């Protein structure tokens, strides 16, 4: 894929200042996505996935949230330096977001048609009422909802249908980048597959790039071109789909892959990662994964390792890669 | 109940107390209420020791020569339209508001909880009958209900008390019923039932303790409302009758002399307001302390 | 929609029957013989007995209640013991005055309470929020009659801006005489509405659909108006409906303070002269008004919240299943 770079996040740092101390949610995350590409962002609950997505759109509730440092270049421009009014033009238009829970992400007192029309109208103020309605009907058709449901309210839709409406809202203005935050987690398995298929088809059709946030490696394997693994607010490994799934180098990635059941390999027991992610208000000085890591040595808990390129495009944040390799 | 369960229960209350103590406004409210209680007890003690002579001499006896005198070093809140010391009358009045408000709410808590618990626990017809009757009572604005009761039975202390108590019963019945309904189907109740616990035991041992938090909050806010209603009824001449000192009736009398001295209007009203404000602060604090989820 | 309103109307009937019974029962407990009260001290026992017969006071309570309801349905609330004029005509004569006062009070409450609540929620924990919440706590704790006395002391007696007593005739004098009573009556409710609006808005601000709205690129003003406020409105409407009951109680006190010639005054005067049919009639009339306000609140719900509305629409199977889920 030789297309050009669409978004580049550099050293993004986001903290939440709460009564119980500062939550270090993102601690210098860098990543990039090319046009039309899908990047999978994988990590446990609380690793900072949603904060990253909301941070890109500058939707972090403040207070308590605060973007402490870093840059977000979208089509070459640092959107962190944009004014709030300039951001309004980006949100829902060039970059849009799909939230986790379809049950609560739609306004219960507005018809779905109005909720879709709203995003089109705000970015195309010249459209007349009729044209607006036509465009809503068109986008509804794209997500597989018949036009006679345009004046219904969210409570009249099932969970899967609601998520289709939310995707329709997100794609209504043909965004260049879609941030999909666990778009299928709240859905039944059969519906999950349908919705994922639909997202895939539509994003190809519109040539939309996507950052797909998930904790489900199966979903990521199915949809993504590249994968970034995030742990305690830092990217610990990043690479092509093949790099990550066939040749994982970071102990955390290896642990993640071993903790899912495989149909092809014979395993008596699953191998879960022991322990819990460190408290984000009180991160250890060294590699945050060290306390749970089988390969950790004294050196690991002294300083946070740098992200290093082991193969072209395959980055790993671990000082023990070599010994990890030996043991395996 | 096992030791461990007891311990966690105790620490739940301790947690709530710790949260409440951190809430400065709620503590100010609590402090003022405690001050009122101490003052009220003090006046009762004075009445007992002096066999009511101090009361007759300084709180009731008129001294028309000095009427409407403004605040001075001798009488810090001044004198009223009959030349009585407003400070003393205001202090002596505490017992009526505080005591009657508390007793009225205590009565309605007992009746309301009983009805609400039965309605929630037994459900079906029982629930329907009780709650529809409560709906009917709720449909009558509480001040009107109290007024009708006082009108029919006469303006005595007990009647005012009963009038206020009755008008608050539906509130508590609803509160308790709602908590019972959420608790009733929990698995530990099923377990207790499976172990052969009687209805009375389940209600007393499991359901009532679970309703306490909302009940305490409602009750503290209820006392505030009750005191306000008592003062209102007295202001209308339907509550406590002069010359007995009561904040509402003091204000009612002050009305005719409003041009002659601001102090007779301001002081009793300020006492009512500060009392209600303290109870509201305490009630809000209790709600935040007992159910942190509700806190915004 | 009509089905919903009809259903609510039907549900009101048993409640109103219960209310009338309770009030009727309480008032019948009044000690003393009404006949003796009407005829005064000089009445002969024969005259009293005759009047008791005319007033059907010898009938059993339940029968008298049924008779009262039947009369009531014909618009007959009986006659005043005091002056023999029909209760209904006196009540209807005073009702508009109380209605004017109550509506003005509600308007004051909404005009202050809702903006203050919204601003407080939008700027949570700011100085503005703290100040307005302290003021609303004071407002909630302020006895209506005391506030009335203070206002008339300051603005009527000291400054002379507004009359302290009575109801003006003609539009402008009426408006002028309405200012102080309306503020008196509305302040407590304004404080309650402000607190309710704030907490309801704060609840809504946290909802996911607000994030969705932000992600659409809408301006904050639009989000507040279109997405937050409409959703926050349901608890606010409930609070306003409940406030109306308080307002009726407060109206009696306010009318007393400002000598406003309304239903509350009429009721208190009747109470003091033991005019039972007047008290009964006016309590019932106010309660019925209160029930209708509650009905109106329920109907407003249905307008605001499509979930409630569709429960009562003729729904197809698919829709009904979605509602149930």
Image: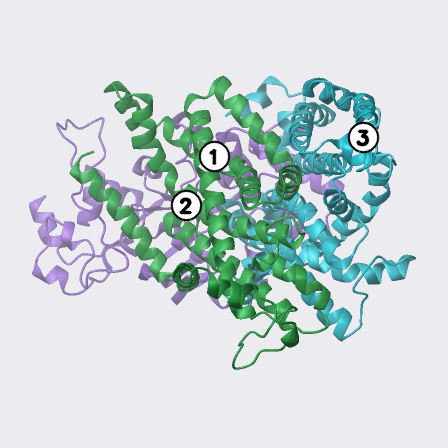
Element marked by disc 3: loop
In the rendered image, which quarter contains the C terminus of chain A?
top left
| Mark 1 and mark 2: Cα distance apart in space | 13 Å
Tell me the residue that label 1 is attached to.
B112
* Mark 2, residue position: B216
Q: Secondary structure at mark 2?
A: helix
Pinpoint the chain carrying mark 1.
B
What color does chain B have in the rendering? green
Instruction: Say which of B275 and A152 sits in front.
Output: B275
Measured as percent of width and height from the top left, residue A201 is found at: 49, 35
Q: Are marks 3 and 1 in contact (CB under 8 Å)?
A: no
In this view, the residue farthest toward the bottom is B73
Q: Is residue C146 above or below residue A326?
A: below
What chain does mark 3 sit on? C
- For residue A93, say whether it is visible: no
Chain letter, colour purple in render: A
Q: Colour of chain C?
A: cyan
Answer above or below: position of A303 versus C188: below
Identify the residue under disc 3: C77
Select label 1 or label 2 by which is in front.
1
Residue B157 screen position, x and y as percent: 55, 46
Can you tell which quarter of the image residue A172 is in?
top right
């Amino acid at each position: 894929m030789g297309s050009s770079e669409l978004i580049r996040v550099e050293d993004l740092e986001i903290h939440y200042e709460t009564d119980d101390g500062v939550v270090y949610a993102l601690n210098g995350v860098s990543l990039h996505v090319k046009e039309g590409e899908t990047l999978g962002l994988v990590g446990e609950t609380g690793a900072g996935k949603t904060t990253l997505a909301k941070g890109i759109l500058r939707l972090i509730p403040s207070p308590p949230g605060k973007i402490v440092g870093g840059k977000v270049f979208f089509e070459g421009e640092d959107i962190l330096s944009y004014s709030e009014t300039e951001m309004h033009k980006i949100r829902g238009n060039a970059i849009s977001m799909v939230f986790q829970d379809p049950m609560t992400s739609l306004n219960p007192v507005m018809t779905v048609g109005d909720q879709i029309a709203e995003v089109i109208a705000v970015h195309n103020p010249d459209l007349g009422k009729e044209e607006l309605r036509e465009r809503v009907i068109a986008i509804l058709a794209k997500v597989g909802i018949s036009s006679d449901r345009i004046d219904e309210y969210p409570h009249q839709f099932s969970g899967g249908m609601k998520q289709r409406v939310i995707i329709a809202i997100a794609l209504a203005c043909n965004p260049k980048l879609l941030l999909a935050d666990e778009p299928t987690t709240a859905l039944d398995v059969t519906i999950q597959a349908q919705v994922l298929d639909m997202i895939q088809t539509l994003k190809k059709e519109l040539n939309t790039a996507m950052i797909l946030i998930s904790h489900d490696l199966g979903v990521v394997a199915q949809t993504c071109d590249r994968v970034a693994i995030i742990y305690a607010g830092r990217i610990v490994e990043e690479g092509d789909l093949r790099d990550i799934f066939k040749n994982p180098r970071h102990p955390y990635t290896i642990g993640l892959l071993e903790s899912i059941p495989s149909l092809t390999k014979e395993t008596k027991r699953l191998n879960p990662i022991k322990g819990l992610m460190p408290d984000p208000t009180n991160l250890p000085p060294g590699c945050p994964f060290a306390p749970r890591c089988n390969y950790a040595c004294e050196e690991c808990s002294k300083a946070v390792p740098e992200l290093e390129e082991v193969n072209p495009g395959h980055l790993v944040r671990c000082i023990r890669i070599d010994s990890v390799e030996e043991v395996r | 109940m096992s030791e461990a369960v007891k311990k966690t229960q105790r620490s739940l209350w301790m947690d709530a107390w710790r949260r409440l103590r951190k809430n400065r406004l709620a503590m100010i409210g609590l402090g003022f209420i405690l001050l009122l209680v101490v003052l009220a007890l003090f006046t009762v003690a004075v009445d007992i020791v002096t066999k009511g002579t101090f009361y007759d001499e300084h709180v009731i006896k008129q001294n028309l020569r000095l009427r409407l005198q403004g605040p001075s070093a001798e009488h810090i809140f001044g004198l009223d339209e009959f030349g009585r010391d407003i400070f003393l009358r205001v202090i002596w009045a505490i017992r009526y508001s505080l005591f009657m408000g508390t007793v009225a709410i205590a009565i309605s808590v007992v009746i309301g909880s009983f009805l609400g618990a039965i309605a929630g626990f037994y459900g079906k017809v029982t629930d329907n009958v009780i709650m529809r009757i409560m709906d009917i009572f709720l449909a009558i604005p509480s001040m009107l209900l109290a007024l009708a009761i006082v009108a029919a039975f006469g303006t005595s202390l007990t009647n005012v008390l009963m009038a206020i108590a009755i008008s608050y019963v539906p509130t508590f019945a609803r509160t308790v019923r709602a908590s019972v309904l959420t608790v009733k189907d929990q698995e530990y109740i099923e377990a207790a039932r499976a172990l052969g616990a009687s209805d009375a035991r389940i209600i007393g041992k499991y359901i009532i303790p679970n309703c306490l938090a909302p009940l305490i909050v409602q009750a503290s806010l209820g006392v505030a409302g009750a005191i306000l209603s008592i003062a209102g009824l007295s202001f209308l001449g339907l509550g406590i009758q002069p010359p007995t000192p009561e904040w509402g009736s003091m204000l009612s009398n002050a009305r005719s002399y409003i041009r002659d001295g601001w102090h007779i209007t301001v002081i009793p009203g300020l006492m009512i307001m500060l009392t209600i404000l303290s109870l509201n602060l305490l009630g809000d604090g209790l709600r935040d302390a007992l159910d942190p989820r509700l806190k915004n | 929609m009509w089905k919903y309103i009809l259903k609510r109307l039907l549900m009101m009937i048993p409640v109103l029957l219960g209310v009338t019974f309770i009030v009727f029962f309480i008032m019948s407990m009044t000690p003393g013989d009404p006949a003796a009260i009407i005829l005064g001290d000089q009445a002969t026992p024969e005259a009293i007995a005759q009047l008791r017969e005319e007033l059907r006071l010898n009938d059993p309570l339940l029968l008298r209640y049924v008779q009262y309801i039947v009369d009531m349905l014909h618009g007959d609330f009986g006659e005043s013991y005091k002056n023999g004029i029909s209760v209904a005509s006196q009540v209807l004569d005073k009702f508009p005055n109380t209605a004017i006062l109550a509506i003005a009070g509600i308007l004051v409450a909404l005009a202050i309470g809702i903006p203050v609540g919204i601003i407080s929620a939008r700027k949570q924990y700011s100085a503005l929020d703290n100040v307005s919440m302290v003021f609303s706590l004071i407002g909630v704790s302020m006895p209506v009659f005391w506030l009335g006395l203070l206002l008339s002391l300051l603005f009527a007696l000291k400054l002379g801006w507004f009359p302290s007593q009575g109801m003006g005739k003609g539009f402008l004098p009426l408006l002028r005489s309405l200012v102080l009573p309306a503020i008196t009556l509305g302040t407590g409710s304004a404080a309650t509405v402000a607190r309710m609006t704030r907490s309801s808005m704060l609840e809504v601000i946290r909802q996911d659909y607000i994030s969705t709205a932000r992600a659409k690129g809408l301006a904050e003003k639009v989000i507040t108006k279109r997405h937050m406020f409409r959703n926050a409105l349901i608890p606010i409407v409930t609070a306003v409906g409940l406030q109306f009951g308080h307002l009726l109680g407060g109206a009696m006190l306010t009318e007393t303070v400002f000598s406003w010639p309304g239903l509350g005054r009429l009721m208190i005067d009747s109470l003091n002269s033991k005019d039972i049919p007047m008290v009964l009639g006016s309590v019932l009339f106010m309660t019925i008004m209160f029930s209708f306000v509650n009905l109106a609140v329920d109907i407003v719900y249905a307008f605001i919240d499509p979930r409630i509305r569709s429960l009562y629409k003729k729904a197809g199977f698919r829709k009904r299943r979605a509602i149930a889920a």
